[in-house]
Amino acid sequence: MQNQLKTVIIQADLAWEDPKANRKLFKTKFETLHQDIDLVVLPEMFTTGFTMNAEVVAESMDGKSVSWMMEQAQKYEVAITGSLIIEEDRQFFNRLIFAFPDGNIKTYDKRHTFSLAGEDKVFTAGKDKVIIDYKGWKICPLICYDLRFPVWARNVEDYDLLLYVANWPKPRIAAWDALLKARAIENMSYCIGVNRIGLDGKENEYCGHSAVYDVLGNNIIPLRPNKEQIETVILEKKHIAYYRDKLKFLDDKDSFSLT
């Protein structure tokens, strides 16, 4: 078990529907990272932006972007995560890829497809909540619109880190700020949200507000809005253990099952 998790979050503008350009962008950013990083977090649909044009830009699990993530993870000896548009069995998924430094991967398919943008008509919703075990840290990865549904994020697995990758637009950024903080507080876990900046191909504007919240809801590294930025944060197991043992709020949680 590793008591610290040194995590890098990358807030960036994305080239619209251009996986090659976006892979190049993030490759350049990886080259600036210091050594001894454990985890790098990229935004939702980091190779394309939040497009519904899945038939044109979707890739397979054997495609260039997944292979690139695996190569970069092994090269820099770091886990890398972010979501991609994946086609599988004639269906499209907004799929988070978690690439381990040893060459393995785990995936999570977005549960709550964003009906306001028609995502539900293009993408198949995921069915399974996923907990990733990495260096003794239990990580619950979720994607953008999932943030609005606290039951799906409820910490019944005793996870340490709740992770959201997003393309969350500027007009509703107050909800992003409030809900990330709430998810950290109610689940007594670290909560990281990584959002993009810039304009997409539909003229939607994104302002970032990527952040890391501790178990008390303190934003420990708020990123500057509207700026490309790379920030490193060290998460501490002792912080989680101290407040869970002292306050014991999770002991009083309601029991339920999802159908």
Image (spheres, grey):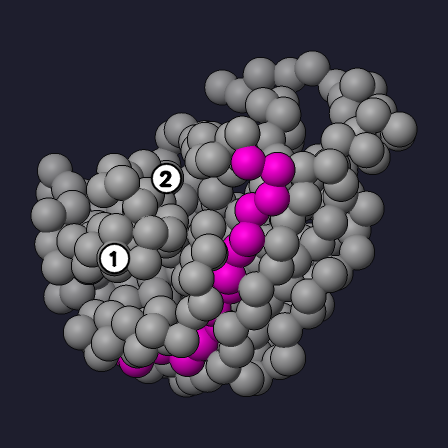
Q: Can residue 190 be seen by looking at this rendering?
A: yes
Q: Quadrant of residue 55?
A: bottom left
Where is the N terminus found, in terms of image quarters?
A: top right
N-term mark: 1 or 2 = 1
Residue that appears at 43% across and 69% down: 33
On screen, residue 150 above or below 128:
below
Type of the residue with mark 2:
Tyr
Q: Residue furthest right?
A: 246
Tell me the magenta residue range. 2-17
Type of the residue with mark 1:
Lys
Mark 1 or 2: the one toward you: 1
Q: Quadrant of residue 30?
A: bottom left
Cα–Cα span, label 1 and label 2: 23 Å
The dot on residue 108 is: 2
Q: Position of residue 138 (x, y in %)?
A: 53, 32
With 151 as the anchor, is 214 left or right in this view?
Answer: right
The answer to whether mark 1 and mark 2 are in CB contact below 8 A is: no
Q: Is residue 16 magenta?
A: yes
| Residue under pointer 1 | 75
Q: Position of residue 233 (x, y in %)?
A: 61, 59
Q: Position of residue 46 (x, y in %)?
A: 34, 65
Find numbered disc 2 in the image and state the secondary structure of the residue it sits on. Answer: strand
Question: 135 or 197, which is in the foreground?
Answer: 135
Q: Quadrant of residue 199?
A: bottom left
With 245 as the anchor, is 169 left or right in this view?
Answer: left
Q: Position of residue 80 (x, y in %)?
A: 37, 53
Question: 251 or 94, which is in the foreground?
Answer: 251
Residue that appears at 79% across and 19% down: 251
Q: Residues within 10 Å of mark 1 (few under 14, many from 20)?
A: few
